[in-house]
C-alpha cells in the first residue's frame, strides 16, 4: 500500500509554455499553502498565486494552483497541482523547494495511478487503458485506449461475472436444497444452456480480442521476393522516404529493414527482407534465414515478382492464402499475370496498393464500438474462464459444476485486478512515466 505524500512533474520534461507539478497525500495541502503563502483555494477552482521558497522566501514563479481534497481526486487522496511556467529552471526550482519538506518525497513511476487503483478509483483494465492512451501513436489506438480507460471493457467483464454468479446460484440451490419445498428440481440441467451460451459469447470475444492486441502492438507487414524484385523500392514508396538502400546489385539488403507507419490510423511495421535465393556467403544466408522467420510471423505479407523475369520459384513457394501478390516494375513489361501491377518509377498501382493494404489492416485490427481485449493477460484470463465454463457445462455432479463456475468468476476477477495480481502490479505500473 502506498504511503506518504509524493510529488512529481506530471507534464512532459523539457521546455514548454506550461508545466504541471502534482502532489498527492496528506501533506499536499500544507505544502501548497506554504509555497503560496495563503490559505488553500476553493476545491477544483484555479487560483493565481505567487510561489516562494518555504525556507528562504525567495520568489519562484507566478502560477495557477488547484486543490482537490480527498476523496474527490484522481488518487482518492488530497491532491494539489501547480501549473507553472515550463522553463527548465522554473521546474527545477519548484521541485527543489518541494524537496525541502520533510514529509514529501519524489514519486516513483506510475505511483499516482497506482494510488488511484488502490483507492478503487480505477480497475486494472482502466489503468492499462490509461497507459495505452499515453502511448497511443495513431487515431485507432487512441480510440481503443480511451474506451478501455473509461470502463468499456470493465463493464463487459462485470456483466459476464454477474451472469456466472446467477448460474452458480442455480447450481448452489441444487446442492443445498435438493428436497426443499418451493425449490424446483433439475436446476443443474437448467443452468447448462446458460453456461454454454456464456462460453460461446466469451469465445466470440476472443476473436475480437485478438484484433485489440494487434491494434495496441501494431501489425507487421513483411515484403518478400527474389533479389532485385523491387522490395526496397516498394518500402520506400509506401514510407514516403528513403528508408532502405536501393541498388541494382543483388543481395544489397542483408538484414530486415523496418519502417513504422500510420496507415489510416492503424500502426503498421513494414519490413523489407533479404532477397530469397541460394545465398552466396554466410552473411547473406543469415539474412535470408531472418527474412523467412520474419515472414512466418508477419500479420500480412507482400510477395513481389519482377515483371521482366519468369516467376521466381523460391518466392512462388512462399505464397500463402491471404498474401498480397504484386508484379513490380510494371512499366517495363505488359505481359504479366492477373495480379496487382505496381511501378515505383511511374506510380502505377501504388495508390491501389496502399488502399488494399489499408483494407487488409482494418480487417485484421479494425475495431468496432464493442470493447476488445488489448493485452496477452486479458486473453489468458478469458481462456481460463472459457475452460472453466466448458468443464462446468459438462460436469455431471452439481458440486463439480459449482467449483468450475467459481473458477470462471475468479478468472474474470483476475482480469479486473481484483485477485491474484500482486506480482503483476509492479510490472504494470512500471510502464508509466514518473508523474502519472
Image: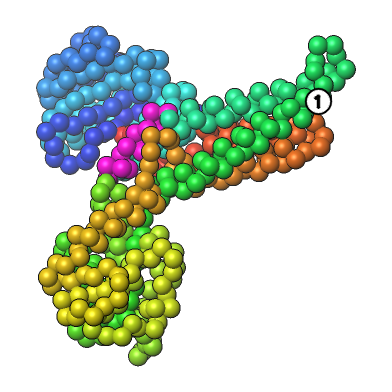
Give the quadrant of residue 295. bottom left
* Visible residue check, residue 228: yes
424 in magenta: no
Q: Position of residue 159 (x, y in %)?
A: 54, 26
Please name whichever residue, 99 or 378, is drawn nearer the observer in this view of the structure: 378
Task: Give the prevailing secondary structure in the magenta stretch.
Answer: helix
Please name whichever residue, 406 or 183, is drawn nearer the observer in this view of the structure: 183
Give the quadrant of residue 356. bottom left
Residue name at image x 37 percent, y 15 percent = 72
Does residue 94 sit above or below 64 in this rendering?
below
- The crowd level at tag 1 (other Cα within 10 Å; few <14, some 14-19, many 20+) is few
Q: Position of residue 325 (x, y in %)?
A: 33, 69
Describe residue 173's horizontal placement relative to residue 85 as left or right.
right
Secondary element under disc 1, as helix, strand or loop, is loop
Residue name at image x 66 percent, y 36 percent = 196
Does residue 299 sit above or below 214 in this rendering?
below
Give the quadrant of residue 261. bottom left
Describe residue 425's horizontal placement relative to residue 304 as left or right.
right
Q: Position of residue 330 (x, y in %)?
A: 20, 75
* Visible residue check, residue 171: no
Describe residue 334's horizontal placement relative to residue 132 as left or right.
left
Q: In which quadrant will I find the C terminus? A: top left
Residue name at image x 28 percent, y 11 percent = 43
Residue name at image x 33 percent, y 82 percent = 311
Residue most extreme to the right: 179
Q: How is the image coloured?
A: rainbow
Q: Which residue is mark 1?
A: 186
Q: Which residues are magenta?
A: 137-151
145 in magenta: yes
Amino acid at each position: 500500500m502506498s504511503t506518504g505524500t509524493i510529488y512529481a512533474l506530471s507534464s512532459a520534461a523539457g521546455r514548454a509554455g506550461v508545466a504541471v507539478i502534482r502532489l498527492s497525500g496528506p501533506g499536499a495541502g500544507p505544502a501548497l499553502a506554504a509555497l503560496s503563502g495563503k490559505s488553500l483555494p476553493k476545491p477544483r477552482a484555479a487560483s493565481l498565486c505567487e510561489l516562494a521558497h518555504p525556507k528562504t522566501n525567495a520568489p519562484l514563479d507566478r502560477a495557477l494552483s488547484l486543490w482537490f481534497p480527498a476523496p474527490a481526486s484522481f488518487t482518492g487522496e488530497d491532491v494539489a497541482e501547480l501549473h507553472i511556467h515550463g522553463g527548465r529552471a522554473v521546474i527545477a526550482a519548484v521541485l527543489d523547494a518541494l524537496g525541502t519538506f520533510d514529509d514529501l518525497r519524489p514519486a516513483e513511476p506510475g505511483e499516482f495511478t497506482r494510488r488511484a487503483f488502490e483507492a478503487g478509483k480505477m480497475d486494472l483494465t482502466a489503468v492499462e487503458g490509461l497507459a495505452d492512451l499515453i502511448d497511443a501513436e495513431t487515431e485507432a489506438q487512441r480510440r481503443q485506449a480511451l474506451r478501455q480507460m473509461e470502463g468499456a471493457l470493465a463493464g463487459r467483464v462485470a456483466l459476464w461475472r454477474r451472469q456466472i454468479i446467477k448460474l452458480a446460484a442455480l447450481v448452489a440451490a441444487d446442492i443445498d436444497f435438493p428436497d426443499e419445498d418451493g425449490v424446483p428440481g433439475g436446476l443443474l440441467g437448467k443452468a447448462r444452456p446458460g453456461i454454454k451460451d456464456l462460453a460461446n459469447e466469451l469465445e466470440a470475444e476472443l476473436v475480437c480480442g485478438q484484433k485489440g492486441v494487434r491494434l495496441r502492438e501494431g501489425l507487421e507487414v513483411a515484403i518478400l521476393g527474389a533479389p532485385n524484385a523491387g522490395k526496397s523500392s516498394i518500402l520506400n514508396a509506401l514510407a514516403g522516404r528513403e528508408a532502405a538502400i536501393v541498388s541494382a546489385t543483388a543481395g544489397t539488403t542483408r538484414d530486415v529493414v523496418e519502417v513504422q507507419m500510420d496507415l489510416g490510423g492503424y500502426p503498421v511495421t513494414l519490413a523489407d527482407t533479404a532477397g530469397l535465393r541460394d545465398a552466396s556467403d554466410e552473411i547473406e544466408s543469415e539474412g535470408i534465414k531472418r527474412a523467412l522467420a520474419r515472414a512466418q510471423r508477419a500479420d500480412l505479407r507482400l510477395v513481389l515478382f519482377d515483371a521482366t523475369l519468369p516467376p521466381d520459384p523460391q518466392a512462388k513457394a512462399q505464397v500463402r492464402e491471404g498474401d498480397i501478390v504484386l508484379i513490380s516494375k510494371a512499366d517495363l513489361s505488359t505481359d504479366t499475370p492477373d495480379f496487382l501491377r505496381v511501378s515505383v518509377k511511374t506510380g502505377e498501382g501504388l495508390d491501389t496498393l496502399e488502399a488494399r493494404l489499408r483494407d487488409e489492416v482494418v480487417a485484421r485490427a479494425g475495431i468496432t464500438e464493442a470493447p476488445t481485449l488489448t493485452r496477452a493477460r486479458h486473453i489468458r484470463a478469458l481462456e481460463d474462464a472459457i475452460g472453466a465454463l466448458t468443464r462446468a457445462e459438462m460436469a455431471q455432479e452439481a458440486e463439480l459444476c459449482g467449483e468450475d463456475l467459481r473458477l470462471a468468476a475468479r478468472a474474470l476477477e483476475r482480469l479486473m485486478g481484483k485477485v491474484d495480481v500482486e506480482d503483476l502490479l509492479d510490472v504494470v505500473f512500471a510502464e508509466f512515466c514518473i508523474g502519472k
